[in-house]
Image (cartoon, grey):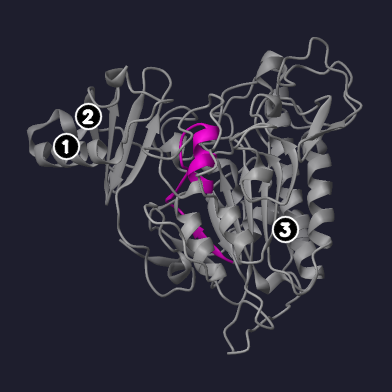
């Protein structure tokens, strides 16, 4: 199914805040052949903004009524919002591995949150774009290889890296240090009993890591020369909780407009974190415009999985998963369906809501097409540029997920159908019709009329999974 719906995307009740997200000044760019999207023969640039544990329903343009996200909403109003956008996994590291490698969780390198690094033979989006002459940088959370390993960002195509290489370190928004490449950068926070990876709860909070990382990112972006294409990966840690801080884990320096809301403290903190991320998106868009690169750059906004129930956060309070069931660590829609917005003024038509299922794995082929690069064989990735330009939906293909915790689970979406099997390979299959039952309330596999659909789902899942030495299913152990 492929439909385009033209709609404004502003959260209800924003009032005067919408003025802060007024349209940016036009900076029309065309190639020598008259095609919009680049100038002077320079290929278009790419920015990927990846939120951390932001739910499908946490943004205004997808129905959020409590949390203010005018800049993200404006991104959607000026671009294309995929209502059926999917993360690579329901937890962070494998989702990021899918995003970077263009392979789904059945055969990407990193399939769980253990410290398994990417290897030298793994090819990332950054490596392909760097090979095409792009400047490449990652600011924020990586999770696919620490300093000294083959998976570290500077060994996987990024010329500049600043932030957290380790996902456990990234829990702490007030850490004692961050990483610039493979060098420690000391901060003024104090973390008693700091863990091996930098995790813990700060007793003295001075430097909020998301703000420091964002400043570094904008400084790098402003240093780009006019003739240089670039790939900027902004992997925020917002609104992830500090799991080591227990119920006091929603770490944000100020509550802003939420200070006087009659809400639980943690929900005011969660909202303040999301709005802080929104302001960073605004600064990014304003910076691109001031550089004259606004219409020369495809900006994609995503989240790595569904909302969390950690650090004292209650995802039900703001309806963070929208109409979908489940949260982070579930393969129901609420755990894997995420914000997925593409903005490229002059190329992507404004105000489009596209219901085609799209997936993290699709970034790779899309980036390759953007840069005019060949991509490796054996990927699961689909080029979304024709869809973004309004020409055609992405090729129809089953979408697959694995989860290697809590006994394991796997899922596949094929057309309107969604199947979940737990444990992997040997468990019973649940079947849902997402068109009639987006909340996955009715298991059709319980009746006799869908036997063929259940068998089809099993075939897809069996074919999608390739054995991994690091991430074995219960049947493979």
Q: How many neighbours does mark 3 have within 10 angstroms: few (below 14), some (14-19), or many (20 or more)?
A: some
Task: Determine whether label 2 and label 1 are within 8 Å by CB.
Answer: yes
Magenta-span inclusion, residue 4 = no
In the displayed structure, 139 sits above or below 46; it is above
Q: Is residue 419 left or right of residue 195?
A: left
Q: Name which residue lies at 30% across and 44% down.
A: 413
Q: Nearer the viewer, residue 397 or 83?
A: 397
Q: Name which residue lies at 36% across and 38% down.
A: 106
Query: Which stretch is magenta?
Result: 79-100
SS class, disc 2? strand
Q: Name which residue lies at 79% across and 9% down.
A: 193
Magenta-span inclusion, residue 89 = yes
Residue 259 visible: no
Q: Name which residue lies at 72% across and 58% down.
A: 18
Q: Residue furthest bottom?
A: 33
Which of the two discs, 3 and 2, labels the residue nearer the N terminus? 3
**CA–CA distance in space, label 1 to label 3:** 47 Å
| Pointer 1 residue | 454
| Pointer 2 residue | 429
Residue 277: x %, y % from top left? 71, 44
Residue 169: x %, y % from top left? 70, 25
């Amino acid at each position: 199914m492929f439909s385009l719906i033209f709609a404004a995307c502003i959260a209800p009740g924003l009032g005067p805040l919408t003025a802060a997200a007024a349209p940016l000044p036009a900076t029309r760019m065309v190639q020598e052949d008259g095609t919009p999207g680049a100038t002077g023969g320079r290929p278009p640039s790419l920015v990927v903004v990846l939120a951390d544990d932001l739910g499908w329903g946490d943004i205004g343009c997808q129905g959020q009524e409590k949390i203010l996200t005018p800049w993200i909403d404006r991104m959607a109003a000026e671009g294309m919002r995929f209502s059926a956008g999917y993360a690579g996994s329901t937890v962070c590291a494998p989702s990021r591995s899918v995003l970077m490698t263009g392979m789904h969780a059945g055969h990407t390198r990193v399939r769980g949150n253990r410290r398994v690094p990417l290897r030298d033979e793994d090819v990332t989006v950054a490596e392909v774009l760097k090979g095409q002459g792009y400047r490449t940088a990652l600011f924020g959370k990586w999770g696919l290889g620490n300093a000294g390993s083959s998976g570290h960002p500077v060994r996987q195509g990024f010329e500049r890296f600043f932030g957290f290489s380790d996902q456990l370190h990234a829990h702490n928004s007030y850490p004692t240090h961050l990483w610039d490449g493979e060098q420690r950068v000391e901060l003024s926070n104090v973390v008693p009993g700091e863990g091996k990876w930098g995790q813990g709860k700060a007793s003295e909070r001075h430097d909020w890591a998301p703000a420091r990382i964002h400043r570094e990112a904008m400084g790098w972006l402003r240093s780009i020369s006019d003739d240089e294409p670039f790939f900027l990966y902004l992997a925020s840690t917002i609104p992830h909780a500090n799991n080591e801080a227990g119920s006091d884990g929603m770490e944000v320096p100020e509550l802003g407009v939420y200070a006087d809301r009659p809400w639980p403290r943690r929900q005011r903190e969660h909202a303040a974190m999301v709005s802080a991320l929104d302001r960073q998106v605004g600064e990014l868009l304003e910076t691109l415009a001031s550089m004259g690169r606004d219409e020369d750059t495809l900006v994609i906004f995503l989240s790595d999985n569904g909302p969390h129930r950690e650090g004292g956060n209650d995802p039900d309070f703001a309806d963070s998963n929208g109409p979908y069931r489940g949260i982070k660590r579930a393969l129901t829609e609420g755990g894997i369906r995420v914000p997925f917005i593409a903005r490229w003024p002059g190329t992507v038509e404004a105000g489009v809501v596209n219901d085609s299922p799209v997936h993290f794995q699709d970034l790779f082929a899309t980036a390759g097409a953007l840069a005019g690069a060949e991509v490796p064989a054996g990927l699961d990735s689909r080029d979304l540029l024709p869809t973004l330009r309004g020409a055609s939906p992405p090729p129809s293909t089953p979408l697959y997920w694995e989860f290697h915790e809590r006994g394991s689970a796997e899922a596949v979406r094929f057309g309107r159908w969604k199947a979940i099997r737990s444990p992997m390979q040997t468990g019973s299959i649940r079947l849902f019709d997402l068109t009639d039952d987006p909340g996955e309330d009715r298991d059709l596999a319980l009746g006799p009329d869908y036997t063929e659909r259940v068998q089809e789902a099993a075939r897809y899942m069996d074919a999608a999974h390739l054995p991994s030495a690091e991430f074995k299913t219960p049947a493979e152990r």
